Image: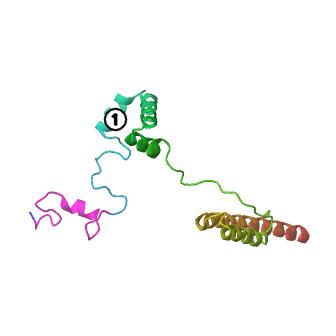
């Protein structure tokens, strides 16, 4: 067994399987441990059966859960708040920013943003996300400025 086929072991074609693995036993990227297995996204049989049983009943069940929550059922309240109306992960913020037409305008916009943070109008986390937008916008403005300058130079030279 071992001499004629050095990659073969007592478990069959272990050599072929080992080629798809790293030395530490992990599978190489893009290699499945079960290539004949279910495709990604395939739903479990029990999940499909439950979906078939609930088909067309979602509105009634939601209304019942809301009614129970309104009647004081704390479990139904938790369900409604967690599933039907979860807390927003992001919300719009409002504060004054000067217009940004040049790259230099981003400095005054950044100052206005820092002022809004210091006054408590904007949280530091929100300011970080707005600053990322300002930085991206500044890059776009700079590219537009460079494009205009290059076009003007080319026109002047022609």
Magenta span covers which residues? Answer: 2-27
Image point (69%, 71%), residue name: 114
For residue 155, what is the image quadrant?
Answer: bottom right
Residue 66 horizontal/vertical position (percent): 46, 35
Q: Which residue is mark 1?
A: 48
- Front-lying residue, 79 or 22: 79
Residue 136 horizontal/vertical position (percent): 67, 65
On screen, residue 135 versus residue 146, left or right, reads: left
Image point (83%, 69%), residue name: 149
- Front-lying residue, 102 or 93: 93
> Quick check: is 23 in the magenta stretch?
yes
For residue 42, what is the image quadrant?
Answer: top left
The C terminus: image quadrant: bottom right
Residue 118 horizontal/vertical position (percent): 67, 71
- Label 1 packing within 10 angstroms: few (<14), some (14-19), many (20+): few
> Quick check: is 12 in the magenta stretch?
yes
Residue furthest left in the image = 1
Q: Work out whether 114 lies above or below 81.
A: below
- Front-lying residue, 48 or 118: 118
């Amino acid at each position: 067994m071992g001499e004629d086929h050095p990659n073969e072991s007592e478990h069959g074609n272990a050599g072929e399987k080992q080629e798809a693995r790293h030395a530490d036993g992990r599978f190489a990227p893009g290699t499945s441990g079960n290539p004949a297995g279910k495709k990604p996204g395939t739903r479990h049989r029990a999940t499909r059966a439950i979906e078939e049983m609930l088909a067309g009943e979602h509105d009634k069940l939601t209304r019942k859960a809301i009614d129970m929550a309104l009647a004081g059922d704390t479990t139904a309240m938790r369900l409604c708040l967690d599933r039907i109306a979860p807390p927003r992960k992001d919300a719009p913020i409002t504060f004054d920013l000067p217009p940004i037409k040049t790259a230099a305008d981003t400095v005054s916009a950044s100052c206005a943003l820092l002022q809004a943070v210091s006054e408590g109008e904007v949280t530091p986390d929100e300011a970080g996300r707005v600053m990322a937008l300002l930085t991206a916008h500044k890059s776009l403005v700079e590219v537009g400025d460079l494009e205009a300058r290059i076009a003007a130079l080319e026109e002047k030279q022609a």
